[in-house]
Each structure stands twice: as C-alpha cells, then as structure tokens.
Image (cartoon, rainbow, N blue to C red):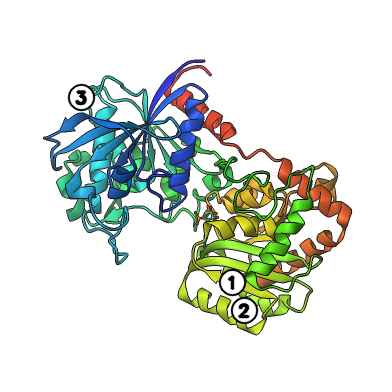
Amino acid sequence: MAEIKVLFATSEVAPLIKTGGLADVSGALPAALRAIKVDVRVLVPGYPQVMAKLGPHEAVASFDDLPGYPPCRLIFSIMENGVPLLVLDCPLLYQRTGGPYSDPTGHDWPDNPLRFGLLSKVAAVLGSSESPLMWRPDLVHCNDWQTGLAGVYLSVAPGAVPNVITIHNLAFQGNYRPTKVQKLHLPPESFSVNGIELYGNMSFLKAGLYYAYHITTVSPTYAREIQHEPLGFGLQGLLHSRSRDVTGILNGIETDEWDPETDKHLAAHYSVARMAGKADNKRALQQRMGLQEDPGIPLLGVVSRLTHQKGLDLLLEIAPKLMELPVQLVILGSGEPAMQHAAYHLVESYPGKIAAMIGFDEGLSHQIEAGADIFIMPSRFEPCGLNQFYSQRYGTPPIVNNTGGLADSVVDCNPDTLKDGTASGFILPSMTTDGLFDTIKRAIEVYRDEKKWKSLRKNCMSKDFSWETSARAYRKVYLKVLGRPE
Ligand code: ADP
C-alpha cells in the first residue's frame, strides 16, 4: 500500500481542545488514517488548553519573519493515540484565557483573522519547499474556515503541494471586512470574486473552497444540500460549479467510548446478544430523572444543543399533545433561553412524565442513549450528527429529519426495510409538528410489537460506525488529488 504524507491543519483536536464536532474528527480520523498507512501529522494552535496537556515535546522550528505575522515556533509532540502533533506556539495570539474563538464573555477575538491567518500561513509553509522541517507532506488537509487561507498561500508558494478542505459546518465562514484581511499579505489577485471576496467581505471559507483541489464534507447528502439554497449559505454557486470536486464522507464514532458492553456511565452493560441490561438502564434513568418507574411505557430521549438548527422547538410544541399518549420524555441540553424555559415549564406541567436537565452532562448523555427506548433528533439541517450513531449503537432507534448525515445513517422502518434487515429508525415525512407527532406515534406502534422492535434494535446495534470506513474514503480522495492509483 502506497504511503501518503498528510499535514492535517485544524483549529481544534480532541482531547486537547474541543468546542464541537471538528475536534472529534481531528482527534479520531488521523489515527484511523495512520492505521491504513497514511502518515498524518496534526497542526493545531498552542492555546493554553493544548500547552497544558502536552506530553514530552520539543521545539522543531521557528518562524521569525513571516510577512504580516508575529514570530512563532513549532513544537513537536505525540498525542496519546500515537498521532504526531505540531503545535503552533505563538503566545501573543493564542495564550489567552477564554475559548479558541472567543473571549470569556463569548465575544469573538477581534484579531481572529490574524490568529487563523497564521495557522493557514504556517500550514502552507510546511506544504512548500520553504518548509524548515525534514518531513514534507504530499498534501495539506484543511478543515473549516480557520484554515481556509492555506490554499491561497499555497497558490503562490514555491514547490507547493495540493490541498483538500473539509467542511464541518458551512454556516461558519470566517467573513471579515476587507480592512481586517489586508494586512495578511495575501496575493493581490486573490482579492476578487475569483478568490476570497464574498458579497463585499473577505471570506476565509470561500477562499478555502475556491483554492482547494478537492472539497469534502461530512455526509453525502449534506454534500448535495450545500450546493443549493438555503443550506449553501451564500456559497451554493461556488459549490455547485465545483460539484465534481465535492465528496461527502460520513464521519465515524469512537466505538470504544460509545460501547454498551463496556460504557462506564451505565447502570448495566448489554449487547445485541444479551439485551437484559437495557431494561436496567431504563429503570436507572427513570429513577435518576424523577420519572415514574414503568418498564413498559415508551421513553423518548433527547441529547442536544437547544437551538433552532436542532428542530426541538417542534418537540416542545407538541409535548402537551404527546402527553395524551402513554409516553415519557427526557431532555438533556442547553442553548436558547426560550427553549430552556419551555423545557422547564413542561417539567412543571407534567411531573413524572417529562424530565429535563439543562446543562452539559457527559454521563447523563450516555445514560439517555442507553435508557431511552426512542431517540429524537429532528434537526433542520445536520452536516453529519453524532447522536443518531450513538443511539443506534445503543439499540435506541432514532427519529430523525430527512437531511444531511441523518438521512445517510438512518434507514426508515417500514415493512420492506424490516424484511431486508436494514430498518434502523424513523424518518419524518415533513419537518412539521404533524410530521413529528405522526412519526412518534408510528414508532410507538412498532415498539408495541415485540418481534418487530427486537429486529429493529438488532439492526441498529449491528451497524458498523467505526472510523475505518471513513478513513478509507479520505485516502481515496488523497490518491485522486495526487493522481496516484488506488
Ligand atoms: P452538534 O455537534 O451539532 O452539537 P452532534 O450530534 O454532531 O451535534 O454532536 C453533539 C455531541 O455533543 C454529541 O456527542 C452529544 O452527545 C454531545 N452533547 C450535546 N449536548 C450535550 C449535553 N447537554 N450534555 C452532554 N453531551 C451533549
């Protein structure tokens, strides 16, 4: 198998620094790629959270005169999962109290163009003949807007390698007024519609998409959806014109961390062959959340950010009507204040039938995946999504909207799919309150049919969500870009 060397440039990587799904992908995909002989190294900024968690490390290069940027250096280390790490150490830009993108009050750092311009610039230098390192990548893999300028810098760098960019969420684009970007020493010709300009702004993500040799995103359906309104968020024209270079690759999950046979958060372990433990988890969840202990009542679970994107406003709206059915509901999440209030109000109105925890609780999220009977995830859009994978792996069929990664990872339950063994959840016929209500009723009917429910759960739990399949698909993209045979 041919060896490919890849520099994976990212603004977050789990477990060192995480705000969202990008960190999960950056933490898991490089390790899965290394297992199939792709030599990946991860480049990430040296935020305090990263510096504090570094194992043995050494400085391997310094950059004192990158035009427009302060001095910085590269530190080499190896992550716990064995993936080599290049930390971009620039205390002036990254050593701050707060998050990677915003200050402790939640406002974006005003110098984010400079902070992520530098990350992009260093990625490009490492992918050119000006690199101070012995190790030279064959390709630079960029992720989201924070590394979007790498392609621009590579376009004028000597001996530059090609680059690929992955979109994890097109809604975040890194758009700035031109004055904010002028100091970054980009080639003058890039300041045009055939470059980084987007409706009068300078867009890091637009640049990334324009200059990349190939574009990937985190599910095949989302890859199609972003080529049109409304999910193209202004970039649909560019993406559509490059549609032959756009590939959707579904994310995997951490199958060791999310395993009902070994999960340390669960009251009891279970597997597709020994399902008894799932009932123990349901009882434990009902107890913990103050729900009536009833093994037979269908228990609906939600773990989510409470935002418009996730579509849970529909669930909160139909909850009173749902409560006329024999059903319980448990919600874990935080987000928009109006939705948080609505959830609390429902708990007060239906004690013992609806429970909610507003906040972030890793253990409870595992307990809901295991203890609920049906998982609810009616996102309006979902680049990939994770919870629908977890719920299937835990034998808790999900109800999902027909969009993005949800459409690609859940097969609607009907007589045909039950017969051929592919059914693994329920897909809304329409993103409406009626659509959601009717689908929940449909799921409860199947739940009441013991034989059908058993085979549905078995299908869910037998699916392969490991990163290996995704890693092979990324490797194929790299080989295509490099013009090498598979
Ligand atoms: P997104 O990244 O858009 O929020 P995903 O489904 O892709 O949605 O991933 C969300 C991740 O965050 C999952 O691992 C989910 O379990 C977790 N999560 C979301 N909200 C909470 C919460 N309140 N408590 C614990 N885990 C949560």
Q: What amino acid does circle 3 point to?
A: Glu
* Coordinates of residue 187 in the picture (x, y in percent): 19, 38
User: Residue 14 sits in which quadrant?
Assistant: top left
Q: Is 291 left, or right, of 295 in this rendering?
A: left
Viewer-side residue, 160 vs 264: 264
Q: Vertically, is 440 above or below 338?
A: above
Q: Where 372 sits versus 391, above or below?
A: below
- The residue under label 1 is 356
Above or below residue 100? Residue 156 is: above
Which label sits on residue 130?
3
| In this view, 79 is above or below 424 | above
Residue at far left of view: 65
Q: Residue 403: x and y, percent?
A: 60, 54
Kindly tell me whether residue 428 is visible in this rendering: no
Q: Are marks 3 and 2 in contact (CB under 8 Å)?
A: no
* Residue at 45%, 33% in the rendered image: 81
Q: Amino acid at mark 1?
A: Ala
Give the residue at mark 2: 347
| Cα–Cα span, label 2 and label 1 | 7 Å
Q: How many badges with numbers are in the image?
A: 3
